Structures are given as C-alpha cells and as structure tokens.
Image (cartoon, helix red, strand yellow):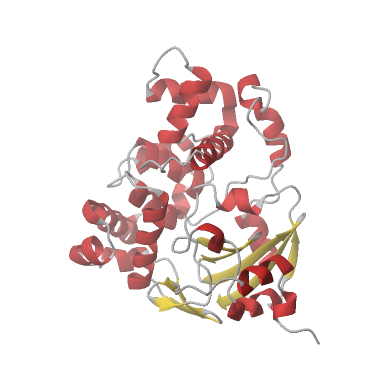
Amino acid sequence: MTSARENIPRRAQHRLAHRAEPDILLGGERLRIIDPLMVRGAQNIGIAEKNAHLWALPTLSVPAGEFDLVRTLESGQCFRWWRWARDAYWGIVGSSVLVIRQSRNDLRVSVCGGAPPADIATFINRYFDLSRDYRAILRHLRRDEVFARLAPRRAGLHILRQDPFEVIISFIISANNHIPRIRSIIERICRVYGAPIDTPFGRAYSFPSPESLAEARLSDLRVKCGLGYRDVYVKRTARAIADHLALAEWATWPTPVLRRRLLQLDGVGEKVADCILLFGFHRLEAFPIDTWIRRAMKELYFADRSPSLGQIRALAIERFGPYAGVAQQYLFATYRTTDERNGKRSPSE
C-alpha cells in the first residue's frame, strides 16, 4: 500500500521538503491548504504535507474536451476558487465544497464538504458549460483579423454558469476595486453571513442568502466585512431581491430588458450590469468594459483616437456579435497576463 505522500507528484514533494508550511486562514479558520491570496511566489502552487489526503479523495471523471480549468477560473469571472496545485483547485459552489483537477481532457471532481449535487457529472457539465461548442465560437471570433492575432487556437476558456444573486453582490463589490481585495471582502461576508460547511481540511462558508444580507447591520457590512461605501448598495439590493424580485423570472427576459432592470439596482452601473449579464445570466453577447478592456479595444481598434464607452460597445457588437462576452474574456486574459508579466499592479475595476 502506498502512503498518501507517495500520491503527490514528485515536484510537489520537492517543494514540501524545502519549505515550511505557512499559516493559512480562510474565514477565520486555520486550514490545511494553500490560499493564493495569502501566500505568494512559489508557495502559490503546491500543497502542505498534511493536505496529502486531498490527492486520494474519491473522484469522478468528467470529459471536458478542450476546456482549460486554469484559464477559466483565473479569468476574473468568479471569486471563490483557490488553486492548491498546478492544475487543481478547490472551491465553494452553492452548498458544496469541491476539489477539481484537470488531467488532459478530463476533470477529476471530488466533493469534500456540504451537500453533494444529486448528479455530480450533470452539475459539473452545466457549471463549466461543457456541452457548448466553444471551438465553434472561437472560430467565429477569429474571423476578425485583429482579434485572431492575439487569440489562442484552443478554445479552453468557458463562461461559468453561476448563481445570479452571488454574481450580483460580487460585482457590486467589484466596482472601483481589484481582484485580491474583492475576494477578501467576499470571504468576510461569507464567514459572517453564510452557512458553515465542514470539510476534512477545515470549515468553509456558503455564499449568504438575500435574506441574511438584507438583515445585516450597515456597520457590520462596512467595518467587519470591509465593504465601505458599498454597504448600502449590498443591503438595499439584497433587500429588494429578498422581498419581491424573482431572479428565475429575470432569466427568461430579453437581454435589453434585463439590462435595464439590473441598472435600477443600487450599486449597479453600466459595467457591473454587463458583468452580471455575462457571468450571472450567461448572456454571451454582453461585453463588460473595464480598465483592461478599454485599453485593449483602444490599442487594437482605435489607435488614432480615444473612443467613448458607447463606441467601444457598438464596435464589439459589430465585430463579435452574439459571442462578444467570450471575446471579452480572451481580451481580458491577454492584457491582464501581459501586465502581470511586466510587473504592473492590477488596476481597480
């Protein structure tokens, strides 16, 4: 019988032998796992020795085709996944804590806490949108010669199917913020207002319900959770949704109608509305324009002038059509990666 450590790839074993395990906290609990928000450099990839049992969790293999787990989960569309090995993440989706590893064209999925989905394969297929032909989408987008110069040839980046309420609150928090701080605030909110989920490596927390955030004290949201001026937006929006807004019904509305309704929510402007459309309601035609996208579109399509947001949005619709949101994610990934390689700090959104 092999030991748990022998199940760890040799490169991970080498890291374990040459560094001490850092103290890791998530939601105030000490966890036996690497959290990339708190551990930088080479420590971001790898696991502590007492995490070795994670490699041996019972797994289900789900065919994933050209899907790229890393590119998708690091694309800025979600905030509750943590990398714990080179091609492996753990995250909280609904009331489930999942461990997912990519092995070539398969996803190896384990449920390590909370209520498991009734059909894990169906759940994963839907969440990662694995049934959609992203290769055909990328071929469509690459008809644009300018986009084709920077787009990859493998269609690995997918748009997740996330819970609309979680996305609404997360992107209200994202306004004028950067990704590490967004994630930190969300985790504090979950620790205070979410439901606890016990796992083999510590306690995690679900995303709060509309009712729990609607009842939150503004002072706790502002100070304890770090929301600052966004406290009012989060509380008012949660109250509105808890009292009388049926998000399932919203999902049936045409995109222009849904966009106008989202703009009526507290804390939701043009960019946040488009993020919610794309990441919360899976409207692939939505084209959020943040700092990176504005720069990308100017450099690629408006080199001789400074376009307005309306001009950028109109050109995106003209060039990318029903898949403008997928194009946006590739542009975001390309420009963000370039900035990080050049040592530039992530701008506030």
Which residue lies at the image location 58% right of the left edge and 74% below the top edge? 48
Which residue lies at the image location 74% right of the left edge and 78% below the top edge? 6
Tell me the quarter of the picture where residue 246 sits. Answer: bottom left
Quarter of the image where the N terminus is located: bottom right
Left or right, residue 41 beside residue 155: left
At which x and y percent is residue 117?
61, 70
At which x and y percent is residue 345?
41, 43
At which x and y percent is residue 2?
78, 84
Which is more toward the observer, 210 or 169?
Answer: 169
Which is more toward the observer, 55 or 117?
Answer: 55
Which residue lies at the image location 47% right of the left edge and 32% below the top edge? 293
Which residue lies at the image location 45% right of the left edge and 60% below the top edge? 37
In this rendering, does residue 68 appear at all?
yes
At which x and y percent is residue 338?
53, 37
> Vertical placement of 341 versus 293: above or below?
below
Number of numbered discs present? Answer: 0
> Vertical placement of 109 versus 347: above or below?
below
Tell me the quarter of the picture where residue 213 sits. Answer: bottom left
Which is more toward the observer, 118 or 324?
Answer: 324
> Vertical placement of 300 versus 291: above or below?
above
Instruction: Kindly give the residue lying farthest to the left in the view shown.
Output: 219
Instruction: Kindly give the residue lying farthest to the front in the view shown.
Output: 18
